[in-house]
Amino acid sequence: MKLLDFLRLVRLKKLYQAPPKHRLPQGTLEPNPRHLTRHLKEWPNFFKDVRNHFTPYAKDDYPGLDTFPCPQEWSKMMARKQVVTGEGRTYDYLREGLYNPCEVILRRVFGITGILGPGRVMDIGSPGVVLISGENMKHAFASHARFIMEQKTPWAVPVTAETDIINHYNENCTDKPDSIVKAIHQLYGYMSFNYLRYGALTNGDALLIFRRTPDHGSLLGGQLECSPPIPWNGVGFKSPLAALAYVTHLAHDARDEPRPATLDLTLDDDEKLNSCLPGLEATNITTTKGLSFRLTDRLGAQIGTKVFRGQVIKDQKAIADVIIKIYSLKLEESRKGVEQETKM
């Protein structure tokens, strides 16, 4: 099968949304403190870039594409009514209709062994989906991640193909951040904390592709660019599948920002400490202002929780070895864990 025929075959249907009384509540919490501090910019010539990227491959035959469902089977898959009640059901639909065919393109056209799987591999946060590349993906670490994607429900983040996402974000990011702004903050936080250049956000109605562009050769503090909303019923080079396959191929080869051996975190907010920091009792440090947390070895992980060996640093004379536990506060069980820890 030709690649262009494959892109035309895999057409997505719009999600069926559950009635309001059956929808699961959800919130979007931005990773503190990595708010995007600049205005969002448009990814220039995005659709032209996608077309130019795939044109050399579009009319070539790739026998492996035939292993994916034939047109009749695909039509039956898309004819099934799938009612979305929450993010979990959104993932089930995207797994079948978008992630699986994207993995087929990566493998059969570009020879890339990779999967779009759950985001628990990340050191910071738990994004919906992560592109993991490599031969031994059962034992993947954050260093194997190349791309992250957040999936929301249409009612939680109401972006459509008609949304002017650049103006919407720039007009609302400062004084009145809504769920769309918070979702972009969340994605940007995951990207910057985990040293990733590319990311995506979808709600089953539209797809947004993001990239961080460097300032003076560094991505730290760089600009965030966003594609136009990609309509769910787009076809060929303007389809969600073409956009996702394009950006995951770019992300697989991205080497712009090598992952450091250690990861330093700082807190912008001046928050009061519940007790003295272990090993720094004599320094009379009472707030988080000016503190850095250096993560070295990851000791363990559960859903929504990561444990690291590291250091807390005030200055060259105030350094202590500590164990650092990081919670993903968008998960209820993680929030309960934080409450229990702080009451001890």
Image (cartoon, grey):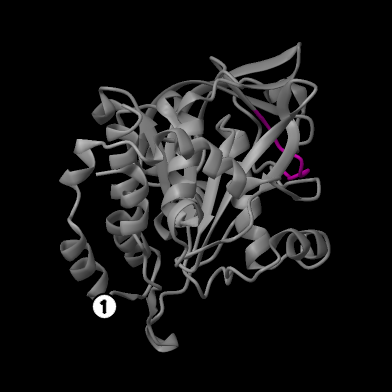
Asked if residue 185 can be seen in this view, the reply is yes
Placement of 261 over or under 153, stated as above or below: above
Q: Taking 259 as reference, is 276 left or right?
A: right
Residue at horizontal 70 percent and vertical 33 percent from the top: 213
Where residue 122 appears, as percent x and y from the top left, is 45, 35
Residue at horizontal 64 percent and vertical 64 percent from the top: 180
Placement of 130 over or under 234, stated as above or below: above
Helix, strand or loop at label 1? It is loop
Magenta stretch contains residue 310: no
User: Residue type at mark 1?
Assistant: Lys
Asked if residue 127 can be seen in this view, the reply is no
Using the rendered view, name the quadrant where residue 170 is placed.
Answer: bottom right
Q: Nearer the viewer, residue 303 or 273?
A: 303
Where residue 116 appears, as percent x and y from the top left, is 35, 42
Quadrant occupied by the N terminus = top left
Placement of 240 over or under 168, stated as above or below: above
Residue at horizontal 79 percent and vertical 45 percent from the top: 37
Q: Taking 179 as reference, is 137 left or right?
A: left
Residue at horizontal 28 percent and vertical 41 percent from the top: 104
For the stretch drawn in magenta, the main secondary structure is loop
Where residue 271 appears, as percent x and y from the top left, is 74, 45
Point out the stretch of residues depicted in magenta.
265-272
Q: Which residue is mark 1?
A: 81
Q: Nearer the viewer, residue 70 or 161?
A: 70
Where residue 188 appears, as percent x and y from the top left, is 63, 45
Crowding near the residue tagged with mark 1, few <14, some 14–19, many ≥20 C-alpha atoms within 10 Å: few
Q: Nearer the viewer, residue 10 or 193?
A: 10
